[in-house]
Image (spheres, rainbow, N blue to C red):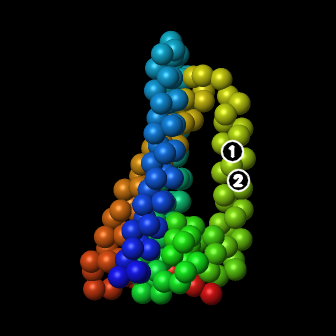
Amino acid sequence: MLGYIAVLWGITGISLLIGSAIYRLSAIGLETFDYSLSWYHWAALAVSIVFMGFAEGYRGFQQAWSPRVAARLLFLSQNVSPVRFLLAPLFCMGFFDIVRKRMIVTYCLTSGIILMVLLVHQLDQPWRGIVDIGVVTGLVWGMASLAIFTVQAFFTQRFEHSPEMP
């Protein structure tokens, strides 16, 4: 039972983190349409949506992060510990108790995302909104893929993805 409470905490924490980003960035993205957009703004918006949907949503989330998080949620349900229980969202996202190479990638990717957030924050509208709409596209794709993989992990006979435990 404690394992499933940890799973619930893990998926809720991750969903709140990503959901908060979607909510905040959507508001900034929608401000883009308060401006008179030229053709090149519209072209940049299309490129941002397609690129971030593919790179972040499909390649980043659907093909890598979401199946691993779902596998770690499944692993957590059967292997809960006090630390994993307390820090379930961080455990599921791969910040600890994961193979060394993946942990290094996770910390480097997180640092890169923080740096990109700081840089994009410096952009003026409508450019910041254009980038943020693309990011929201990727994040929504990511949340959907995480939900699908999590359902597959818990409700199918075999889930073929690795939690990448050390």
Which quarter of the image is occupied by the N terminus? bottom left
Look at the image and tell me whether residue 55 can be seen: yes
Q: Which mark is residue 55?
A: none
Front-lying residue, 1 or 7 = 1
Residue visible at 39% across and 68% down in the picture: 8
Q: Which mark is residue 112?
A: 2
- Mark 2 is on which residue type? Gly
> Looking at the image, do the residues carrying marks 1 and 2 touch, with CB atoms under 8 Å apart?
yes
Residue visible at 42% across and 87% down in the picture: 78
Q: Is residue 62 left or right of residue 153?
A: right
Look at the image and tell me whether residue 49 can be seen: no
Residue 7: horizontal and vertical position, in percent? 41, 73
Q: Which residue is mark 1?
A: 116
Q: Is residue 82 above or below residue 120?
A: below
- SS class, disc 2: helix
Front-lying residue, 98 or 48 = 98
Q: CA separation, marks 1 and 2?
A: 6 Å
* Callout count: 2
- Mark 1 is on which residue type? Met
